[in-house]
Image (cartoon, rainbow, N blue to C red):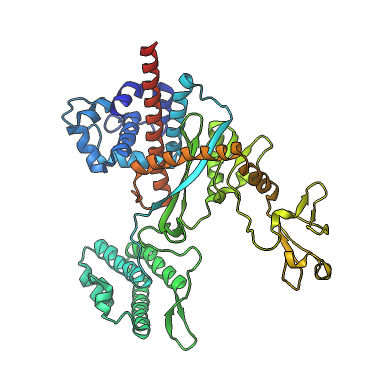
Amino acid sequence: MFVFLRHHRHELFDDAFQEELATLYAPSLRGQPPIPPAQLALATIVQAYTGASDDEVIEATLMDRRWQLVLDCLDTEQAPFSKGTLVAFRKRLIDAQMDRRLIERTVETASPTREFGSRALRAVLDSSPLWGAGRVEDTYNLIGHALKKIMCVVADQQGREVVEVAKEVGAELVCGTSLKAALDRDWDQQLQKDEALALILQVLHTVDAWVQQLPDQEDKAVADPILAIAKQIQEQDVQISEKGKVSLIKGVAKDRRISVEDGQMRHGRKSRSVRVDGYKRHVLHDLDTGLIRAVGLTPANVPEASVTEAISEDLDQQKVSLKELHIDRAYLSSHLVRERSEDLEVYCKAWPVRVGKRFHKQEFVLDWEQQIIRCPAAQEMPFVPGGIVHFPKDTCAQCPLKAQCTTSAKGRSVSIHPDEALLIELRQAQQTPEGRHKLRERVAVEHTLAHVGRWQGRRARYRGLRKNLFDLRRCAVVHNLHVLARSQSLQADLQDAA
């Protein structure tokens, strides 16, 4: 990667793209000479490749000749930029959506040599879990963590010790090393757990009243957002009966907050037995080139299909359309499928039809022109995609095939999927060797997700959705550069063989 970037950095960061990056900064005649944005962008990419921290990046520019070769600062005695400059550049990239342009540049760089133009894509879309960087805690510790954080930020603002501020407020309970140890309850006894929760809420009300009476508006400004987090957790997790009894709400609130430090992390599922606390990363893989054309990031509790709007925006920026879309069933409800054009072919394993002792759904005939469903006994009923067809109970009661069809006294009912016609096509395709071979093409995206996971890691590097999307995008850039490097190597081998 270092060698490839050294030789091809001027193709990736050509004059036009460097001018585009320069628009991130306002021209000024004051201060130090500006740092070339292309140099900072290269450092950002190599940082993703090596997994270095911001401090380690600055150290590497002084100590590692590989970094110096890529950044064109060989044998420098002073770091070419500071940590603050690198962090500020990252923020400018995010604010201007220029991290997306980095992916586009890898595609544009490949275009002249491999004819990756504005052709229609054969693409695969899939996701993998990304555990969040914030600490996941139960309700007791979430509220206690938030209250302790209020004490800390106000103490820093006032230049005092946390213990001193907590004693003044009457919140010593939440400022120890362990809240559960300070409460000292038998956590197997529900009555004692409820008593502990009531004590924590009492401290919350005390801290709330104290924050509202703070004379300094700056102190109040730093405390209010964290106090709002504590109240949010109380509202989503705690209930108080008419008699004033405090207890945890049974079940999980919709869009429940699970971390104080990262408010966008959510509980999700990788499978029935594996829970994900964080996010899902989505990758659109080009089957013909191996490049990543777009990526997306969603909270772990959000359906996969919700990411396709953002994916479409990225593709629109590249002025490309989809010819084939290979997906798993989680994306069948996406707008890419529901609002697809006639030119788009969708390849996906259909939802299975339960086959038992009685007539299953596939034994009912659907006439799409007249929108009529016909049962095995030749009884017809109109249907609407996305609705449920109820055959008359009197007709079913007299039907000679009732024993093979239903045991319900209300008659047989059949649900029609909003995209039932597509599901029928997919099931038919699965029955042929050609169709099964086509479904196996989506395996390529599994390898791409593994590559991205190798660089981004299993756990998020940053807190918050947007920063982790930035991290995912630059890891996609690293993947694309590897594809380009392998392509260059292959072409060189072929020329040598010729």
Reply above or below: 456 against 141.
above
Q: What x and y, as percent, mark residue 151?
A: 28, 68
Direction left: furthest residue: 77
The residue depicted at 28 percent of the width and 38 percent of the height is 50
In the image, residue 121 sits, relative to residue 467, either above or below, namely: above
- How many numbered discs? 0
Q: Say if residue 25 shows up in the picture.
A: no
Q: Residue at x 42, y 33 (%)?
A: 102
Taking the view exactly as shown, the residue that stands out farthest to the top is: 498
Is 69 drawn above or below residue 95 in the view shown?
above
Q: Nearer the viewer, residue 25 or 11?
A: 11
Relative to 484, does residue 155 appear above or below in the rendering? below
Task: Residue at 38%, 68% (x, y): give it.
Answer: 227
x, y percentage for residue 24?
Answer: 40, 34
Residue 438 appears at what percent x and percent y?
57, 37
Residue 110 pos. (x, y %): 45, 24
Which quadrant would the C terminus be assigned to in this image? top left
Q: Left or right: where does residue 284 sit relative to residue 425? A: left
Residue 347 in sight here: yes
Q: Nearer the viewer, residue 33 or 342?
A: 342
44 on left or right of 95:
left
- Extreme residue toward the bottom, this view: 243
Q: Quadrant of residue 161?
A: bottom left
Residue 339 appears left or right of 276: right
What residue is drawn where x is 73% and y is 54%? 363
Q: Nearer the viewer, residue 327 or 303?
A: 327
Q: Quadrant location of the N terminus? A: top left
